[in-house]
Image: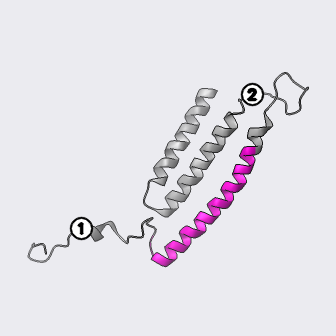
């Protein structure tokens, strides 16, 4: 179970990093959200994964650690607020700049030299 859990956290981290490195603001917001979910799962796993663990002490031999659960719950709320804020910033940048590029460029073709009718470059 721990191997599958670690593979899932690694895949989410890899997908989040890939999306953050994209040039579009919406992909960056999705990548940051995916990274926050991966970190939440990692923190949750730091409290030891226990199957059928009791929450109340004394009811079972193994019990669930409440600290990682509280940290993840707090991180979910803060992550939701930050995602909403980043999405509003991305929408504002799109309306001001007219595109979805992170650096504000209109097209990638702006840096290429333009050809004239005679095939000569200026």
- Coloring scheme used: one colour
Q: Looking at the image, which residue is at 37% across and 72% down? A: 106
Q: Is residue 54 above or below residue 24?
A: above
Q: Residue 31 in the image: x percent, y percent?
A: 53, 53
Q: Residue 110 in the image: x percent, y percent?
A: 29, 71
Residue marked by disc 1: 112
Q: Nearer the viewer, residue 2 or 79?
A: 79
Q: Residue 84 in the image: x percent, y percent?
A: 64, 63
Q: Looking at the image, which residue is at 68% across and 33% down? A: 46
Span colored in magenta: 71-99
Q: Is residue 118 above or below residue 11?
A: below
Q: Nearer the viewer, residue 108 or 85?
A: 85
Q: Is residue 112 left or right of residue 107?
A: left
Residue 72 covered by magenta stretch = yes
Residue marked by disc 2: 50
Q: What secondary structure characterizes most of the magenta part?
A: helix
């Amino acid at each position: 179970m721990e191997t599958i859990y670690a593979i899932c956290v690694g895949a989410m981290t890899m997908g989040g990093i890939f999306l953050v490195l994209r040039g579009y603001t919406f992909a960056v917001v999705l990548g940051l959200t995916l990274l926050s979910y991966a970190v939440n799962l990692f923190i949750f796993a730091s409290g030891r994964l226990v199957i059928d663990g009791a929450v109340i002490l004394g009811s079972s031999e193994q019990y669930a650690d409440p600290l990682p659960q509280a940290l993840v719950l707090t991180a979910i709320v803060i992550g939701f607020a930050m995602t909403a804020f980043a999405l509003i910033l991305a929408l504002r940048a799109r309306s001001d700049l007219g595109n979805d590029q992170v650096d504000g460029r209109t097209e990638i073709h702006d840096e290429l030299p333009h050809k004239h009718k005679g095939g000569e470059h200026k």
